[in-house]
């Protein structure tokens, strides 16, 4: 294996590798972490571009052992006495762009580049975990995944229903508040289910299609048979109660507590064929950056463990 694997240099202490090594197949990955430091889809409060930077700099550095092929080991969960992500290959492949953002890179260019990169990652079979950035990035990321996996079910935790019925044939016209309209109109997603929603939509955003369902509570119920439809999982951090997570652009009172969100996210990952994940809308706030990183870190590890530690489920995830 000639591609350089840099143990301990990625987020959460994961090995860092070059993007090209994964895309060319030189390295085989079970999952990759890709930062999206972009917030041009926010017409109001910016700063989400710093999300990947905050996550990487302040995430806990787990002491993984890494073999010559990048397989993980060496970390034990004392609660269940088992190893964590043992034998899995999870790589941090850096960011798409950097902070500060080059002003010559427009929204259309960034969205088009992300769509193509998401498609390429889907073709490798690796699970991409995108760290935003604002929520408009879900549109190009899901579009790329949909080109490989077919129409997706979009499962989202969000305080807001990010939908508008206005015509949006071009992704460059979307914002973080209406991108779902574009995804449904384009046929990238067959349906969308949103949990944690607790705000109203203006009348001119409607009518709401039958393929869009919003609720506050996540419906656990009896554990269903595994649903093998390809699912895109999106986590907007403003779904969390602001007292627990204030560092987001549009906080809404009455949100999920973090433990509640982690349990719901784990349930989605264990019962559905999740083909891509994004975690978005963390805001730069010097008073809250450590708490922000800790929250994003907990969500990333919850998704990875639920999706990768159970071989039977992983066989139908990629």
Image (spheres, rainbow, N blue to C red):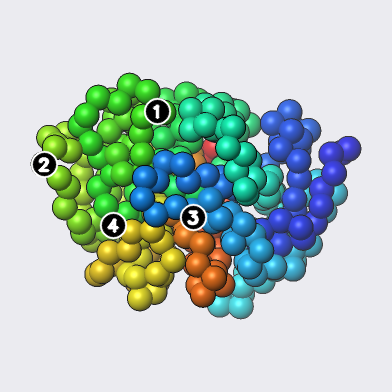
Q: CA distance from mark 4 to mark 2?
A: 18 Å
Of mark 1 and mark 2, the one earlier in the sequence is 1
Drawn side of residue 133 relative to residue 44, left or right: right
User: In the image, what residue occupies the spot 85% across and 44% down?
Assistant: 4
Of mark 4 and mark 1, the one earlier in the sequence is 4
Q: CA distance from mark 2 to mark 3?
A: 29 Å
Which residue corresponds to mark 2?
203
Which residue corresponds to mark 3?
47
- Decide which of 266, 210 is in the foreground and name it: 210
Please, what secondary structure does the residue beneath circle 2 have? helix
Image spot of residue 201 (x, y percent): 17, 47
- Decide which of 155, 34 is in the foreground and name it: 34
Of mark 3 and mark 4, the one earlier in the sequence is 3
**Residue 187: which quarter of the image?**
top left
Q: CA distance from mark 3 to mark 4?
A: 19 Å
Which residue corresponds to mark 1?
171
| Mark nearer the viewer, 3 or 4 | 3
Which residue corresponds to mark 4?
159
């Amino acid at each position: 294996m000639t591609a350089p694997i840099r143990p301990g240099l990625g987020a959460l202490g994961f090995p860092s590798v070059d993007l090209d090594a994964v895309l060319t197949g030189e390295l085989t990955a079970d999952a990759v972490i890709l930062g999206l430091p972009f917030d041009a889809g926010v017409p109001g409060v910016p700063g989400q571009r710093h999300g990947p930077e905050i996550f990487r700099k302040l995430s806990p550095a787990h002491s993984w052992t890494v073999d010559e092929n990048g397989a993980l080991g060496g970390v034990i969960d004392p609660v269940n006495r088992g190893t964590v992500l043992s034998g899995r290959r999870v790589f941090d492949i850096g960011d798409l762009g950097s902070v500060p953002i080059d002003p010559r890179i427009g929204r259309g260019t960034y969205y088009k580049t992300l769509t193509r990169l998401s498609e390429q990652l889907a073709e490798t079979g690796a699970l991409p975990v995108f760290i935003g950035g604002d929520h408009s990035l879900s549109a190009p990321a899901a579009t790329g995944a949909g080109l490989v996996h077919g129409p997706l079910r979009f499962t989202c935790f969000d305080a807001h229903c990010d939908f508008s019925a206005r015509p949006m044939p071009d992704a460059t016209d979307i914002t973080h508040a209406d991108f779902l309209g574009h995804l449904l109109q384009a046929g990238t997603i067959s349906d969308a289910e949103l949990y944690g929603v607790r705000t109203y939509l203006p009348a001119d955003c409607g009518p709401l299609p039958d393929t869009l369902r919003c609720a506050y509570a996540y419906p656990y119920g009896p554990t269903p048979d595994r649903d093998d439809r390809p699912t895109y999982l999106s986590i907007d951090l403003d779904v969390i109660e602001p007292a627990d997570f204030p560092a987001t652009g549009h906080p809404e009172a009455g949100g999920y507590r973090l433990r509640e969100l982690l349990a719901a996210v784990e349930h989605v990952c264990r019962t559905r064929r999740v083909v891509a994940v994004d975690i978005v809308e963390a805001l730069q706030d010097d008073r809250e950056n450590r708490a922000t990183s800790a929250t994003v870190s907990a969500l990333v590890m919850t998704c990875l463990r639920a999706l990768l530690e159970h071989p039977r489920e992983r066989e139908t995830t990629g």
